[in-house]
Amino acid sequence: REVARYGMGARIRSVTEGPDGALWVLEDERNNSTGRLLKLTPKR
C-alpha cells in the first residue's frame, strides 16, 4: 500500500532502515555528478 509519494528529483537505488529508525536513501548519479547518500529522520 502506497502511503505517500515525494518527488526527490533523482532515481532512488536503495532504501534501508537504520537501527535508530532513520531511512538511508542512495540516489543514482545525475547530470555528470556523483550520486548521494541521504539520511532521512523524522521531524521532532
Image (spheres, rainbow, N blue to C red):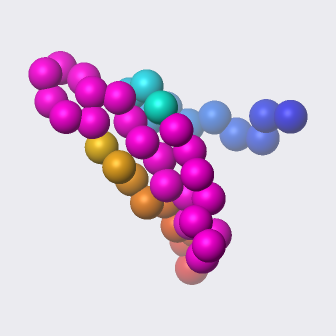
Q: Residue furthest left?
A: 32
Residue at point 58% right, 51% down?
A: 16
Q: Residue furthest right?
A: 1
Left or right relative to 15: residue 28: left
Please identify the quadrant where the C terminus is shown: bottom right
Tell me where residue 26 sits by quadrant: top left
Residue at point 47% right, 31% down?
A: 13
Res. 26 visible in picture: yes
Which residue is nearer to you in this view: 38 or 9?
38
Residue at point 56% right, 45% down?
A: 15
Task: Tell me the magenta residue range.
Answer: 14-35
Left or right relative to 29: residue 44: right
Please state the horizontal and vertical placement of residue 23, each as a whole percent of the image.
56, 58
Please state the horizontal and vertical placement of residue 33, each as a whole percent of the image.
15, 30
Tell me where residue 11 sits by quadrant: top left
Left or right relative to 34: residue 24: right
* Residue 36 vertical position relative to residue 41 in the rendered view, above or below: above
Please state the horizontal and vertical placement of residue 38, each as a whole percent of the image.
39, 53
Res. 9 visible in picture: no
Q: Residue furthest top?
A: 31
Residue at point 58% right, 66% down?
A: 18
* Residue 34 vertical position relative to residue 31 in the rendered view, above or below: below
Q: Is residue 25 magenta?
A: yes
Q: Is residue 27 magenta?
A: yes
Q: Residue furthest bottom?
A: 44
* Residue 35 vertical position relative to residue 21 in the rendered view, above or below: above
